[in-house]
Amino acid sequence: MELKEAIRKRRSIRLFDKTKKVTDAQLRELFELTSLSPSAYNLQPWKFIVVRDEKRKGVLRACGNNQAQVEDASAVIIVLAKLNPSEDVDEIISDRDKKGYFPSSEIKQNYIKIMKEIDTNEEIKAWAIKNAYLASATLMLAATDMGLATCPIEGFNPDCVIKNFRIPSNYFPTLLITLGYQLPDAKIPERLARKTFEKTVDFEQFRKKQA
Ligand SMILES: Cc1cc2nc3c(=O)[nH]c(=O)nc-3n(C[C@H](O)[C@H](O)[C@H](O)COP(=O)(O)O)c2cc1C
């Protein structure tokens, strides 16, 4: 499938075939593709918990406004934003260094300084969440390409997830993604309208008047 086709095909699917399971090999491929997402400084401030156990999915459903899709999907992915990314700086810098990304040691030292200070930024949570959302978009498109269905879910209680899934304080659960196979006879309603090119795209500067 071409990427353009996957983008056009992806829909938020809420009716899952409970009998069809996503395999370990599929999950591995899905997360390998997801790992290729862009991230600030390549810090990849995310982590994913794949929930497949029926009981645990029940707990997650209760945390997720009782949305049935959470139990019906083969797996639910808890997307976590990492709030202390500076922990990974040495590893990331060493890779970058080995591959000749730093034209001088001064630039390298500057880079390290900025990256090490990232945790102290009061916007760290928002910063980590935007990176995790980009990875989530990649994940959903990759899943579509693999013939799998997904739905992003923001309607859940993070504290409930933190409590029931042993999430440490340096991670924040920012999104759930249901994953599985679409119910074969499910009637998927027509795609919701999208804002037009004219409404959403300006050139050179913000237009004063909306057309
Ligand atoms: C950040 C975010 C949160 C969402 N939360 C929910 C949710 O809690 N439950 C749900 O059923 N769909 C949720 N959705 C799916 C949207 O309703 C859906 O993407 C939108 O209506 C467009 O439909 P489409 O994804 O099929 O193109 C969410 C989507 C996003 C991006």
Image (cartoon, rainbow, N blue to C red):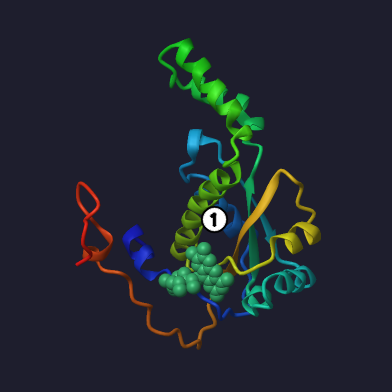
Whether residue 11 is visible here, answered yes or no, is: no
Quarter assignment of residue 5? bottom left
181 vs 52: above or below: below
Quarter assignment of residue 145? bottom left
- The residue located at (51%, 35%) in the rendering is 42
10 Å neighbourhood of mark 1: few (<14), some, or many (≥20)?
A: many
Whether residue 101 is visible here, answered yes or no, is: yes
Residue at the limit of the structure toward the front, as seen here: 208
Task: Work out whether residue 27 or residue 131 is closer to the camera in this orientation and state it.
Answer: 131
Q: In the rendered image, which quarter contains the C terminus? A: bottom left
- The residue located at (77%, 68%) in the rendering is 56
Instruction: Return the x and y of residue 53 as percentages of the image width and height.
Output: 76, 68
Instruction: Return the x and y of residue 97 as percentages of the image width and height.
Output: 50, 19
Quarter assignment of residue 7? bottom left
- The residue located at (67%, 71%) in the rendering is 64
Task: Work out whether residue 42 or residue 82 is closer to the camera in this orientation and state it.
Answer: 82
- The residue located at (22%, 48%) in the rendering is 205
Q: Which residue is mark 1?
A: 30
Residue at the limit of the structure toward the top, as seen here: 105
Q: In the rendered image, which quarter contains the N terminus? A: bottom left
199 vs 126: above or below: below
Task: Work out whether residue 109 or residue 140 is closer to the camera in this orientation and state it.
Answer: 109
What is the secondary structure assignment of the residue under circle 1? helix
The kind of residue tagged 1 is Leu
